[in-house]
Image (spheres, coloured by chain):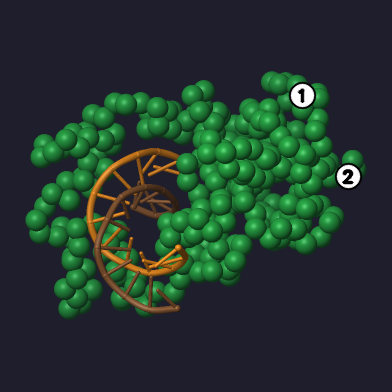
Chain colours: A green, B orange, C brown
Amino acid sequence: MRNHVNHYKCPLCDMTCPLPSSLRNHMRFRHSEDRPFKCDCCDYSCKNLIDLQKHLDTHSEEPAYRCDFENCTFSARSLCSIKSHYRKVHEGDSEPRYKCHVCDKCFTRGNNLTVHLRKKHQFKWPSGHPRFRYKEHEDGYMRLQLVRYESVELTQQLLQQPQEGSGLEASLNESSLQGIILETVPEEPGRKEEEEGKGGEGTALSASRDNPSSVIHVVNQTSAEGQQEIVYYVLSEGPREPPPAPEPPSGDIMEKFQGIAEEPEIQMV
DNA sequence: CAGCAGGGGGCGT
DNA sequence: CGCCCCCTGCTGC
């Protein structure tokens, strides 16, 4: 929920984590083939006990979970099925909660929205982020999280990707955004110096000198299938040192971005 | 073909 | 644990 900066980058992929412990976890789950938890009944093995227990439920003949609502006889083999049943049937919560931020179509489940975003709007996952994240907005709808906080190393890497000259404003005026926006905050001073001459080709659109709050960077790249794909990144030149206050500004970045899409003036903080 | 939903797995928190 | 992934069958336009 809380905005944070991922300072710790995985040496083996583009993943960035906010803490060393979370990076350690990531490396264990992502880059280790060690699966110490093995199923006695089949070939299944996994990396933690909870996943093994979930798997064991699938072997039981009788549904392992029952709805505990009075007089309800619903049962299922997975806990998440029970929970979704309870929400839908006993709490009357069947309204679609996930909304496409491009065409406003609503979906009952996040993964169905994911399919929609990928098939209809050609959204891609940036390298190192093999999933979308959805964020609840003030209107109660879950929408694609367009902004993430990443490390400087990721920024450098993005800047090294091949780019084509494509007007930012033209791209923004096309209502279909085909990428994910990453907001990048520099690391603490002293580690790496500002890179000069970052490829230079003018696809970056900088805010005014007086308010160097952000740079929006549009990367056009070609996928393995030869398809053209566009990824938007927001490179923030935020404070040089970590904000002392634990309270982030938490302005609604989505709203700000939508403002950008309609106004030529770019003001991101 | 698009959306819905159940089942099962991966993995970040 | 919770969120999101894939796979898959069903349904309706």
Instruction: Identify the subunit bearing mark 2.
Output: A
Callouts 2 and 1 in the same chain: yes
The answer to whether any part of residue A178 appears in the image is yes
Give above or below for A142 relative to A207.
below
Residue at image position (50%, 55%) is: A119
Residue A109, percent across and down? 42, 63
Extreme right residue here? A210
Q: Tell me, yes or no, whether the two marked residues, 2 and 1, touch with CB atoms within 8 Å.
A: no
SS of the residue under disc 2: loop
Instruction: Identify the subunit bearing mark 1.
Output: A
Residue in the foreground of this view, choosing between A224 and A45: A224
Left-right relation of A134 to B5: right
Pick whichever of labels 2 and 1 is earlier in the sequence: 1
Left-right relation of A77 to A157: left
Residue in the foreground of this view, choosing between A141 and A233: A233
User: Please, what is the three-letter code of the amino acid marked with disc 2?
Assistant: Ser
- How far apart marks 2 and 1 lie (CA) works out to 19 Å
Residue at image position (19%, 76%) is: A72
Residue A195, label in figure: 1
**Residue A205's quadrant in the figure?**
top right
Residue at image position (69%, 20%) is: A191
Residue A65, percent across and down? 18, 61
How many callouts does the rendering have?
Answer: 2
SS of the residue under disc 1: loop
Residue A18, percent across and down? 54, 36
Callout 2 crowding tier (Cα within 10 Å): few <14, some 14–19, many ≥20: few
User: Please, what is the three-letter code of the amino acid marked with disc 1?
Assistant: Glu
Residue A176, percent across and down? 65, 58
Residue A208, label in figure: 2
Residue A244, label in figure: none
